[in-house]
Image (cartoon, rainbow, N blue to C red):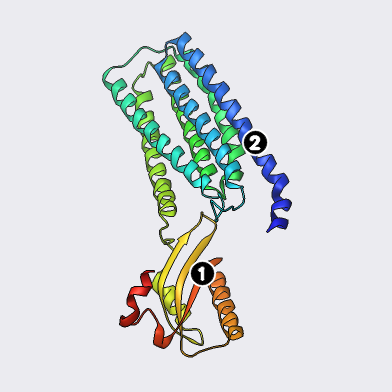
Amino acid sequence: MSHNHDHSHGTENVSDGVLLWTVIVNLGLSVFEFVAGAISGSVALMADALHNTNDAAALLIAYIARKISRKGADEHYTFGYRRAELIGAMIQLTALILVGLYLVYEAVRRIFEPEPLLGGWIMAAAGVALIVDVITAWLLWSMSKGSLNVKAAFLHNLTDAGASVAVLLGGAAIYWLDWSWVDPVITLIIAGYILYMSSGMLKKTSRILMEGTPPELSVDEIKEALEALDGIENVHHIHVWELDEHHRALEAHVVIGEARSMEELESLKTTIKTHLDERFSIGHSNLEFESAGKSCHSRANEKHCNS
């Protein structure tokens, strides 16, 4: 365990540095867009600045959560702090859904109450914002593959790049064609994408925090697979959950047919754990062995199954 940590420490520090820089850059972009929006009188730029501010906050949460998640287990948190990233993802996704709903409101309002905008200023500011958003999303992309927390931050910036495109196109349409309706229509499309993607990730994050069974696993299939092993008569009281998106855990009562020595039980336990790891990618398992006559699975001892 400690060797793996030391081996990846340098890479993690680089990733943290990238994440921190994206926070700083996005805060700077927010200030720039607020100023540009005030000069041009553009509500669209102010809304995009609000979105960027939310992105900067989301990235800061992701940075802090990554730091906390690496703390080792202690007497207060015996599984460690790895779920801190999931909590960070939950906060980000909730905020992103609120931003999506706000964009829907703002787009609908502008359809019925169009406001004059300076197309040239909008295009210039949105162009700068788009460049920053694309660079930030590119930096986060490689980090997002193994973390819901960073993936949520990546999604924030990807959707913000889309919002910048919408503002840029809207500015161009206003500047050359006087099509003020383009901006709210594109904003509605982007808001719909934000809400669709965020709700799916929020569902996954919530399931892990609620210790739900991984969707690709079947408790019945696990039961059948274990009961097919030599020496096992029955498996019950099965609980399967995820500590985070990379670590699965299982708890089960295993009924054996006859009394065995400690060496035989240890050998059987090793066989079960190996089978769980290789077939179901369950790396942590807690097994309670019972003899057939004294199994809590029998009606006389059923109350002990819940202990």
Q: Rounded to the nearest whole Å, what is the CA distance between mark 2 and mark 1?
A: 38 Å
Q: Position of residue 215 (x, y in %)?
A: 41, 61
Answer left or right for 7 relative to 18.
Answer: right
Q: Position of residue 8 (x, y in %)?
A: 70, 50
Identified by mark 1, the residue type is: Asn
Label tally: 2
Q: Nearer the viewer, mark 2 or mark 1?
A: 1
- SS at mark 2 in the image: helix
Q: Which residue ends up furthest to the left in the rendered image? A: 112
Q: Label 2 belongs to which residue?
A: 18
Q: Is residue 210 above or below residue 56?
A: below
Mark 2 Cα shell of 10 Å, populated few (<14), some (14-19), many (≥20)? some
Query: Is residue 217 visible to us here?
Result: no
Which quadrant of the view contains residue 23? top right
Q: Label 1 belongs to which residue?
A: 286
Identified by mark 2, the residue type is: Val
